[in-house]
Amino acid sequence: MNETLDIRALAKEALRDAPRHRQARKGWLSPINRRRLQLFRANRRGWWSLWIFLFLFVLSLFAELLVNDRPIIASYKGELLFPVLREYPESKFGGFLARTDFRDPFIQQEIGKHGWMIWPPIRYAHDTVNNELPHLVQPL
């Protein structure tokens, strides 16, 4: 029993004295992690690859606004519409389909007469059908 009490007393003493022996850390990184970061920065190819990867990752977060077959914003008869965020029926623009195809010339003319559209830089989505391609295969 006395040995157990002595071990407990020693453990309490060690815990009490621990903060005195600990060195104050500068910043939020430990010294070993600071050294690892320095070594990584010294590898220029790895450092630039990290920044290129981060840039492309942030750019991919806005992919829906950069590449889409629907306008980002449209105004039709004084009403602001956001086709990127919401699907509108074609009957709103004088058509008869359930989903508006903003690439259709009729819809583009109708919106052009009564408003305007702001398109993304690339007007194709992953599932866009391009009906304006020339026929490369000639019939036999």
Image (spheres, helix red, strand yellow):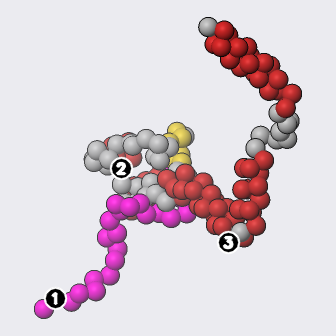
Segment colored magenta: 114-140
**Which residue: 46% across, 46% down?**
83
Q: Nearer the viewer, mark 3 or mark 2?
A: 3
Q: Nearer the viewer, residue 67 or 20?
A: 20
Q: Which residue is label 3 attached to?
A: 45
Main secondary structure along the magenta-highlighted residues: loop
Location of residue 62 in the rendering, given as x and y in whole percent from the top left corner? 55, 52
| Placement of the N terminus among the 4 image quadrants | top right
Residue wearing tag 1: 139
Q: Residue at x 36, y 54 (%)?
A: 101
| Discs 3/1, front | 3
In front of the other: 120 or 37:
37
Mark sitting earlier along the chain (3/2): 3
Q: CA distance from mark 3 to mark 2?
A: 47 Å
Check the image and report above or below for 113 versus 41. Answer: above
Q: Could you tell me if residue 112 is visible in this image?
A: no
Question: Would you say residue 81 sits in the magenta stretch?
Answer: no
Determine crowd level at label 2: few under 14, some 14-19, many 20+ residues with C-alpha closer than 10 A: some
- Measured as percent of width and height from the top left, residue 116 is found at 54, 52
The residue under the point 64% across, 62% down is 50
Label 1 Cα crowd, 10 Å radius (few <14 / some 14-19 / many 20+): few
Query: Please, is residue 74 above or below residue 139 in the view?
Result: above
Judging by the rendered image, the residue that carries numbered circle 2 is: 100
